[in-house]
Image: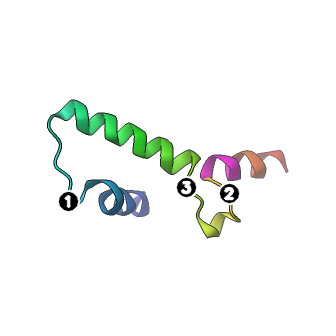
Amino acid sequence: MENFFGRLKVEMFYGEEFESAGEFIGELKEYIDYYNNDRIPMKLNGMSPVQYRTHSQAI
């Protein structure tokens, strides 16, 4: 979790100004979707976290 929150702050939060809490929540939901479905870290063999979990459960 520490790694996730570190990445979240660097990639989404630093240098941004949000007009409202609602805007922040919307951006946060988009980032979490990106983090879980589109982001491809090398340590997961080129798969997104969701793909990796699905693949490892199928084995």
Q: Which element type, helix, strand or loop, lies under badge 2?
A: loop
Find out whether the residues at labels 2 and 1 contact each other: C-beta distance under 8 Å: no
Q: Is residue 37 left or right of residue 12?
A: right
Q: Is residue 50 magenta?
A: yes
Q: Which mark is residue 5?
A: none
Instruction: Pick the residue in front: 18 or 51.
Output: 18
> Looking at the picture, which amino acid does disc 3 mark?
Arg
Up the image or down, 23 lies above or below 36; here it is: above
Q: Which mark is residue 15?
A: 1
- Residue 35 lies, in percent from the top left, at 49, 50
Q: According to the image, label 3 marks what residue?
A: 39
**Which residue sits at x=63%, y=46%?**
50
Find out whether the residues at labels 3 and 2 contact each other: C-beta distance under 8 Å: no
Q: According to the image, label 2 marks what residue?
A: 47
Q: Residues within 10 Å of mark 1 (few under 14, many from 20)?
A: few
**Which residue sits at x=34%, y=42%?**
28
Up the image or down, 13 lies above or below 54; here it is: below
Up the image or down, 43 lies above or below 21; here it is: below
> Looking at the picture, which amino acid does disc 1 mark?
Gly
Q: Which element type, helix, strand or loop, lies under badge 1?
A: loop
Up the image or down, 27 lies above or below 47; here it is: above
**Which residue sits at x=15%, y=34%?**
20
